[in-house]
Image (cartoon, grey):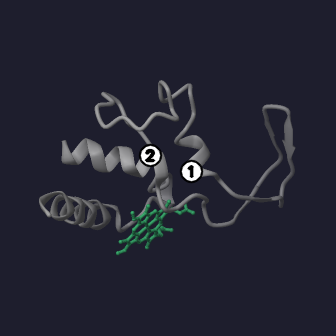
Amino acid sequence: MIHPAIEEILRYNGPAEMSNIRWATEDVEYGDRHIRQGDMLFVSFSSANRDPQQFPEPDTFDITRKVNKHIAFGKGVHFCLGAPLARLEGEIAITALLRI
Ligand code: HEM
């Protein structure tokens, strides 16, 4: 279960809570918010990773989730370049801890 456990740790309590700064390149209507061109924005990965529309019972830590499309490493062109290394490091560290 180490691989799904790593993914669930990243979803449930990933270390990168917010994105780097973004600026809106055009006016956008998002829900009831009016985002204007030039506005500074942050994307909350932590919030997205607890979205009940994506994750059933999002506040439950569950390493048996069948689908776990979290965005703990971001998304798109700025997707984390170190994601494979970070996953491997997590796997090695947690496996070692479990053997103690
Ligand atoms: C659990 C560990 C890690 C997490 C959760 C994480 C998370 C993230 C996230 C969320 C972003 C996107 C930020 C944004 O969109 O504003 C990012 C970008 C990045 N990460 Fe990681 N990271 C981790 C480890 C690493 C490691 C080990 C490396 C390098 C060895 C690394 C290198 C990078 C780089 C270079 C970017 C910028 C990519 C770009 O802007 O094109 N990260 N990371």
Q: Position of residue 2 (x, y in %)?
A: 20, 48
Residue 22 appears left or right of 33: left
Look at label 2 and name its amino acid. Arg
Secondary structure beneath dot 1 equals helix
Which residue in the protein does label 1 denote?
45
Q: Residue 13 carries which label?
A: none
Q: Assign the C terminus to one quadrant of the image.
A: bottom left
Which residue in the protein does label 2 denote?
11
Can residue 71 be seen in this snapshot? Answer: no
Residue 61 appears left or right of 29: left
Q: In which quarter of the image is residue 80?
A: bottom left
Q: Position of residue 52 (x, y in %)?
A: 56, 27
Q: Is residue 79 above or below residue 70?
A: below
Seen as rendered, the residue at the extreme left is 99
Q: In which quarter of the image is residue 63?
A: top left
Along the viewing direction, whichever of 61 and 44 lies nearer the viewer: 61
Can residue 24 be seen in this snapshot? Answer: yes
Secondary structure beneath dot 2 equals helix
Q: Does the residue labelled 1 lie within 8 Å of ligand 1?
A: yes
Q: In this view, does 64 lie above or below 9?
A: above
Residue 80 appears left or right of 16: left
